[in-house]
Image (spheres, rainbow, N blue to C red):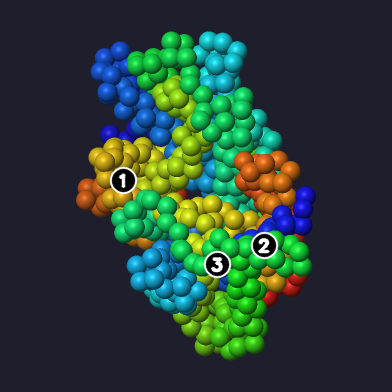
């Protein structure tokens, strides 16, 4: 086991954290298990590909636009489709997001075809050396961005009025509504925010590896694994869990070979879920 | 006209027996194409119905049906290939293997509640698929080819599928009409309250998880025989989990006939008609799912029942007391009733 492998795992963990953050946010605040999160991530990658592949932009320049567009698409979905369902039965929102996932895959297929795509960038395949450890540039960028976005999410939730509203709506929607908080709007904003985070993860995923319309599912599971490891409601935990998952993947590839990566990761995910449903890194119950 | 209570209680079982016998006889009559379609429909029915018992009656919403399809399919196939066992014995191994897997996982799975159970089962299905892909004895990623001569085909395979589907429907009928089913519904609707009244929650959930897994595994064996070549992507693919949910939800979970309708609509009406239009098929399935949970959250079948009743408008008050349990309409675990407290 070399330091290179370990560093690659840690850095890849940043990307996993970014994907898990949106899932965790939506589940923590809305209690909604969003099976379409993988499609939000891949949707971000495809949106960016319009600017990167067609117009020659740099992926990092396309990133804010992809985030904003994804948020705009997500807001009405939550407001007019998913929120009304949250009051119905237990499985309705879950099934609806599954329907959205199928729909998303179909739209990607229709618009972009089934051939693998990637977002070309000067830093996609280059490496750099930090203290004698070789790492891939794109993962360094992804890790940096993940730290920034996690910190930003944490600050928004804890330091702003909007964040207080989100935490209030998460803790007790009924009381929050009585106090004059528009819970429906808060829910939609939260979902839109999660979609924007997903899109950011998607753009960087698209630079690091190629993607197809059906790439969403493994990403969704990675996100779930991060959420299960982190426990609901801990933004810092999400980052730690992403890194833990990344290291676990790297180590299992190093020990057993590439094919066993997914077996180890999903089994670990299941075990963590079963042994500690509240997560490994959970601290206080704040959204 | 009003049947006696005993008859009301037994006519679903009689109807099932009759339908099974008729279908069984059809196995000798139908042509090759019809038999093939029939096997596919019956397998989907068994899997959707097994999911329905687990989720619609037991409240355990699973996204892992593929794990049990794969376990059953691979158990039967590998025994056939590696030990030269005859197919009837290999078929018996399928539900046993699936039940063993369920038993092994139950300690962990039944600790999970609600959505956590859903993602836990999803993780299991994906982990198993990844495991098979790396398992050389099971053929790895390219899968194994069954010896065509020792596998039932045509009418025999169809008759096997009829039996599997009939078992699934029988299980659903049992869940719907027995005291066991009533206690299960109590757990589904309010677990703490049911536990408080002395219902053994874990034991009841296990008693629904095991037969549901066994039937899914049995269907897996039939699918393996039908496919002849089985691979991690085919038999262990996540599509099985998703189709089970889709078909049961479209038809109506927690009902006996809902999944039958769902399987017919989704597979025969959509997948088959649109098999050359993959994208369009995906779009329609996605939109259908969204529309149904939005506007008919209990599924199409209960909606049709209500509409039919309104149209006929013949429900004399004297029918009420005995009628409610014999009827197909769901006992409404949620929704529709104005009990739900508004969030905002």
- Of residues B156 and B331, which is closer to you in this image? B156
Count of picture labels: 3
Of all chains, the one bearing label 2 is: A
Residue at 26%, 41% (x, y): give it. B276
A210 up-or-down from A267: above or below: below
> Would you name the residue on which mark 2 appears?
A135
Instruction: Classify the position of the N terminus of chain B by image quarter.
Output: top left
* Alpha-carbon span between mark 3 and mark 2: 12 Å
A6 on left or right of B238: right
A156 up-or-down from A45: above or below: below
Q: Earlier in the sequence, mark 3 or mark 2?
A: 3
* Alpha-carbon span between mark 1 and mark 3: 36 Å
- Of residues B258 and A82, which is closer to you in this image? A82
Residue at 27%, 45% (x, y): give it. B277
Visible residue check, residue A267: no
> Would you name the residue on which mark 1 appears?
B278
A128 on left or right of B184: right
């Amino acid at each position: 086991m070399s330091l290179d492998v370990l560093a690659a795992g840690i850095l890849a963990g940043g990307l996993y954290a970014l994907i898990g953050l949106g899932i965790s946010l939506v589940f923590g605040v809305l209690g909604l298990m969003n099976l379409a999160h993988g499609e939000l991530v891949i949707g971000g990658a495809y949106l960016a590909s319009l600017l990167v592949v067609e117009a020659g932009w740099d992926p990092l320049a396309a990133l804010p636009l992809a985030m904003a567009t994804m948020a705009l698409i997500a807001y009405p979905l939550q407001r007019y489709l998913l929120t009304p369902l949250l009051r119905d039965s237990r499985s309705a929102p879950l099934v609806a997001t599954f329907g959205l996932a199928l729909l998303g895959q179909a739209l990607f297929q229709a618009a972009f075809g089934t051939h693998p795509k990637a977002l070309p960038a000067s830093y996609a395949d280059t490496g750099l050396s930090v203290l004698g450890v070789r790492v891939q540039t794109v993962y360094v960028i992804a890790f940096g961005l993940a730290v920034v976005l996690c910190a930003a999410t944490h600050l928004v939730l804890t330091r702003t009025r909007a964040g207080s509203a989100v935490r209030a709506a998460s803790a007790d929607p009924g009381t929050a509504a009585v106090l004059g908080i528009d819970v429906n709007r808060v829910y939609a904003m939260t979902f839109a925010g999660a979609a924007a985070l997903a899109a950011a993860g998607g753009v960087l995923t698209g630079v690091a590896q190629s993607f197809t319309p059906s790439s969403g599912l493994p990403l969704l599971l990675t996100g779930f694994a991060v959420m299960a490891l982190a426990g609901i409601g801990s933004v810092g935990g999400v980052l730690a869990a992403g890194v833990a998952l990344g290291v676990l993947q790297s180590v299992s590839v190093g020990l057993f070979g590439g094919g066993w990566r997914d077996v180890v990761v999903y089994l670990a995910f299941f075990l963590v879920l079963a042994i500690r449903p509240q997560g490994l890194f959970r601290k206080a119950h704040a959204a | 006209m009003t049947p006696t209570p005993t008859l009301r209680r037994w006519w679903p079982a009689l109807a099932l027996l009759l339908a099974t016998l008729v279908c069984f006889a059809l196995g000798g009559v139908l042509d090759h194409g019809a038999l093939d379609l029939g096997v596919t429909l019956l397998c989907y029915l068994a899997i959707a119905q097994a999911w329905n018992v687990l989720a619609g009656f037991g409240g355990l919403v699973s996204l892992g049906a593929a794990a049990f399809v794969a376990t059953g399919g691979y158990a039967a196939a590998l025994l056939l290939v590696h030990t030269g066992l005859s197919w009837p014995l290999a078929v018996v191994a399928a539900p046993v293997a699936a039940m063993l897997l369920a038993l092994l996982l139950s300690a962990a799975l039944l600790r999970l509640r609600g959505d956590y159970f859903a993602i836990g089962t999803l993780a299991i299905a994906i982990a198993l698929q990844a495991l098979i892909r790396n398992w050389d004895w099971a053929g790895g990623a390219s899968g194994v080819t069954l010896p065509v001569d020792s596998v039932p085909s045509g009418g025999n395979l169809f008759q096997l599928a009829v039996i599997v589907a009939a078992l699934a429907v029988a299980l659903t009928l049992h869940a719907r009409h027995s005291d066991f089913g009533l206690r299960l519904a109590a757990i589904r609707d309010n677990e703490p309250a049911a536990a408080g009244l002395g219902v053994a929650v874990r034991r009841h959930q296990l008693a629904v998880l095991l037969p549901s897994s066994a039937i899914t595994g049995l269907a897996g064996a039939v699918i393996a025989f039908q496919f002849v070549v089985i691979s991690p992507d085919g038999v262990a693919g996540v599509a099985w989990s998703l189709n089970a949910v889709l078909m049961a939800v479209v038809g109506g979970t927690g009902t006996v006939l809902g999944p039958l309708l769902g399987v017919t609509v989704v597979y025969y009406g959509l997948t088959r008609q649109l098999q050359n239009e993959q994208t369009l098929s995906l779009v329609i399935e996605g939109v259908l799912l969204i529309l149904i949970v939005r506007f008919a959250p209990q599924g199409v079948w209960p909606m049709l029942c209500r509409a039919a009743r309104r149209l006929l408008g013949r429900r004399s008050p004297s029918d009420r007391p005995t009628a409610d349990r014999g009827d197909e309409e769901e006992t409404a675990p949620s929704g529709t009733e104005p009990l739900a407290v508004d969030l905002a």
